[in-house]
Image: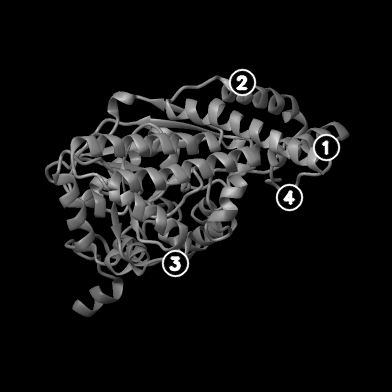
Amino acid sequence: MEDLWCVAVGVFQLWMFMVVFLITLPAMFNVSLGVTGVYIQILVKILEVTEPSCLLSSVHRIIERAVGSMEEDMGRPRSSPSLAGGDFALSDAFYFYKKGLESIVDDEVTQRFSSEELASWNLLTRTNQNFHYISLRLTIIWGLGVFVRYCILLPLRVTLAVIGISWLVIGTTLVGFLSDSSVKNWLSELVHLTCYRICARALSATIRYHNRENKPRKGGICVANHTAPIDVVILANDGCYAMVGQVHGGLMGVIQRSMVRSCPHVWFERSEMKDRHTVTSRLRAHVAAKTKLPILIFPEGTCINNTSVMMFKKGSFEVGATISPVAIKYDPRFGDAFWNSSKYNIVSYLLRTMTSWAVVVNVWYLPPMSLQDGEDAAQFANKVKSAIARQGGLLDLAWDGGLKRGKVKDTLREEQQRMYSSIVLGPIGTDVPQTCGEKASEQ
């Protein structure tokens, strides 16, 4: 029994030596030993070898949508001279029937709130119900992958995550006892940066940063598309940010209270989050101090599956600060980074992420943008959103991410009604064509 205990202690000591000296310390000093790079190259080779056998029969585009406007689409069946003046035609109903069926068959909104389908199986979750047993070789490779991911990588990643979060709580608490000074700010940034780098190693993250000359600067606001909570780890691995969010309880509350002691993060109570004026005032006060860290905001307000960018809330664009857009694009071959909060809680999501192959992501820093003369906050938000979507190769959607849990707003339905009304009656302020009955009554 004593011999078994000695062996267990020896294994634990060897394990902690490897974790601390070969992973944690190099991560704190931002030094890479090249192990993750070799690991990713091996994964790429394995996925390339198994790809011909793992092709899935999913169809990404079920229907071919018309790209014209409502007026153009209705103009085809309304080509009759008697209808050219704008009178109602029964054939108009077919346009709305077609749009309704398109939404039922291939809804471009709700599919953004579920995991992206892959062209081939990545030996993780079976992402398509049409996948079936193929070969013994593929089954053996999958079984070995399960052993590596759950028996080797998962314990390693959990250990690193515990070290990183513990260091964040302890380090920020100790720094918080210091008086406000440049030394305190430097130590706070150092603690945050080293913590997030350790947490990035806990995800086996391979991050490629592009255009670093456009990195967000102090006194500004950084906005990015939102896929998952790990977006914060990915961005903060390359620089420090002031976080914005709601006050939580439990472990998250402990982390928030320790972080705010050393760095001016902006946490709101639940009641304050509903007060738009209060939120805007707090943000303005933060960016007014040019020595404070840039604020990190995800204007979509919810997680999207990294295939598109949805409507940006205009609140952060009303502050008047310089906006630094950032585009984040994950590689889905190595794991699904998207957090479907309607299906998984945060613990389940982190478990799925830590048992995936790796997190491979590209981050693009875009040039700073400011509100132009004659431009309102909504237009500015759309301009920034389009720039992020274009750079990240994402689909630019005008829909509100709030549809993930809510119903379509009445204003959206009213907008469609106004568009159709302008087709039938003509634009507001123009003479409405008279019907034959109206002309006869005048005579």
Residue 437's spot in the image, x, y percent? 29, 76
Residue at disc 2, secondary structure: helix
Residue 6's spot in the image, x, y percent? 74, 37
- Residue that mark 2 sits on: 38
Q: Earlier in the sequence, mark 4 or mark 1?
A: 4
Q: Earlier in the sequence, mark 4 or mark 3?
A: 4
Colour setup of the view? one colour
Q: What's the mark number on residue 406? A: 3
Drawn side of residue 393 relative to residue 149, left or right: left
Question: In whole angstroms, how far apart are the C-alphas of marks 3 and 1?
Answer: 42 Å
- Residue that mark 4 sits on: 129
Residue 297 visible (yes or no)? no
**Crowdedness near tag 1: few (<14), some (14–19) or many (≥20) residues, C-alpha within 10 Å:** few
On the image, which quarter does residue 271 sit in? bottom left
**Nearer to us in this view, 264 or 396:** 264
Tell which tag, 2 or 3, sits nearer the viewer. 2
